[in-house]
Amino acid sequence: MPGPLSGLSVKLIATIIVVILAVEVVIYLPSAANFRAGWLADRLRIGIVAARVLDAVPDIMALPRTLTDRLLNSAGARAIVYRRGGQSQLIELEQAPMPREAVTVDMRAADPMTLIAGALDTLIFGGTRVLRIVGSGDGQEQSLVEVLVSEVPLRSELLLYSRNIFLLSLIVAVMTAVVLYVFVSFVLIVPVRRLTANMIAYRQAPENAALIINPTPRKDEIGILEQQLAAMETNIFSMLRQRRHLADLGLAVAKINHDLRNTLTSAQLLSDQVANLDDPKVQRLAPRLVLSIDKAIGFAQSVLDYGRQSATPPRPVPVDLHALVEEATFDARLAGHPEIGIVNAVPEGLTISADPDQLARVFGNLLRNAREALEGATPGVESPTVEIGYAGEGDWLTVSVTDNGPGLPPRARQNLFVAFEGSARSGGTGLGLAIARELTEAHGGRLEYVPQPRGTRFDVILPRAARIG
C-alpha cells in the first residue's frame, strides 16, 4: 500500500491547490497592475486639482504656505509641476528637498503589458525611489501635470494587497480542493483503494475464493474494471484448483504407471519363455501376446517420460549434427532395418550449439514415428524410406524428417502436438510430437508440420547458435 504522503489522495489535493494558485497568479498580475495604476491615478488627480488652484490664482507667490503644503500632503507628493503654454509652475514642500533622480511613470501610456511591467518593477526594485507621475491636465494635451511622490507607500500598499490576494487565493484553493477531494474520493479514490487492497490480498492467497472481489453495480470504467477483475480472479482460482487436481492425478498416474511397467516387464519375461514352447496354439498366440505387452510397456514408458519432462533449460555445447542424427537412427531402430531405407543428408562435420541429449530426443521421436508409420503401411508402400534432409540460410538451419508412408490421418493433423490426442496410430499417445516440440522451442527454434502429396514431413528449425529462452 502507498505511504501517507504518496497516496493518490495527497497527490490529488496538492495538484488541485497548485493549479488553482497558478491560475490565481495569472489573474493576480493584471489585478496588481490595476491597483498600482489606480494608486498613481489618485495622486495625479490631486495634482490636477492643485493645477486648477494655480490657474485660479493670479499670483502663486501670494498663496499661503500652509495651503500649498496641505495640497501636497493630501496628494502625498513632494512637488507638483503644472506646464501649460510653454510655462511651468511649481509648488513644493517647504522642508522636502528635490530629488536628483526620479523614475518617470507616464499615465498616458496605459497598455496592459506596460502596467504589468510597472507593477513587477515596483514589487521587485521599489524602495527609496521617487516617482515622477506624468499626465494631462484637465484632459488637455497642451497642459501637463507632474507629481513627484515617494514609491515607499505605493510599494507597501502593493505588498499588502498582494498578501491579501495570496491568502484569499490559498483559502479558495484549499476549499476547492477539499470539495473536489470529497467528491473524487467517493467516486474514484475509495474504489481504487478497494481494488488495490483486493489485488494485494488475492495475490497472497489466490486459492481462497473468499478473496474474489464482489463487483458493484457501477456502469462506468471502475465498474467494468471490477467486473473484469472478478472474472479474472475467478478464472485464476478455477485454473489453480484444476492444476492442483491434475498434479495430484498425475502423481497418482505416475505411481500406477511405475508399478504397471514393472508388472508388464515381468509379464514380458514370462511371455518370452512361453513363446519358446513347442505347442502350436502357443506359437500362434504368443506373438500377439508379446506385441500387446510391448505396446503396454511402451505406453507406460512414454507417459513416465512425459511426466518427468522438466523445465530445465538446455545446456548448449558444440554438437556434430550429422553424427547426432546418425545416432538417433540407431535409437529409433531404423539403422539396419530390413525393409526401410534411411538417408541422412545432413552434411558431415556440421556443428551447431545445442543440448545433445535433448536434441537427440527430438530426432529420435520423429524417426520413431516415421518407422512405425512405414511398418504399419507395409507392404502397401513401395521402397519405404525415411530421409533426413538439410537446408541452411543465414543464422538458421532446417533439418527435415520425411517418410513416404500413408501420411497423417485427419484426426492426427487436427491435434498435432497435443499430448494424448495427436497420435497417428491406434494405441499411440501422441506424446512424442508434444515432447519434440517443447524441446525444440526450448532451443529457440520451432517444429513444423509440412503437408506433402504423399507421406509425412516435419521440419526442425534451429538457430546455429544457442538462443535459449
Image (spheres, rainbow, N blue to C red):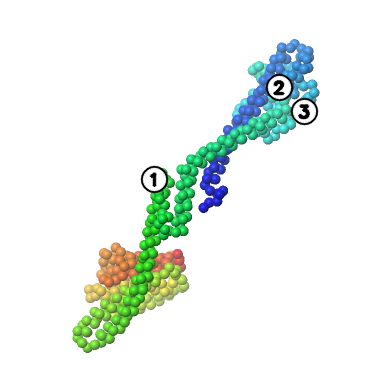
Counting residues from the start of the chain, the first of labels 2 and 1 encountered is: 2
Kindly identify the residue that appears in the image at 62 percent across and 28 percent down: 34
Instruction: Kindly identify which residue carries mark 2.
Output: 75
The answer to whether 320 appears left or right of 53 in the picture is left
Mark 1 is on which residue type? Pro
The answer to whether 385 appears left or right of 105 in the picture is left
Along the line of sight, the residue nearer the viewer: 215 or 302: 215
How packed mark 2 is, by other alpha carbons closer than 10 Å (few <14, some 14-19, many 20 or more), is many
Mark 2 is on which residue type? Ala
Kindly identify the residue that appears in the image at 46 percent across and 49 percent down: 194
Camera-side mark, 2 or 1: 1
Residue farthest toward the front in the current orientation of the protein: 210
Tell me if label 3 and label 1 are in contact, CB under 8 Å. Answer: no
Q: Secondary structure beneath disc 3?
A: loop
Instruction: Kindly identify which residue carries mark 3.
Output: 100
Camera-side mark, 3 or 1: 1
Measuring from the top left, give residue 129's x and y in whole percent.
Answer: 73, 30
Measuring from the top left, give residue 450's x and y in whole percent.
Answer: 32, 65
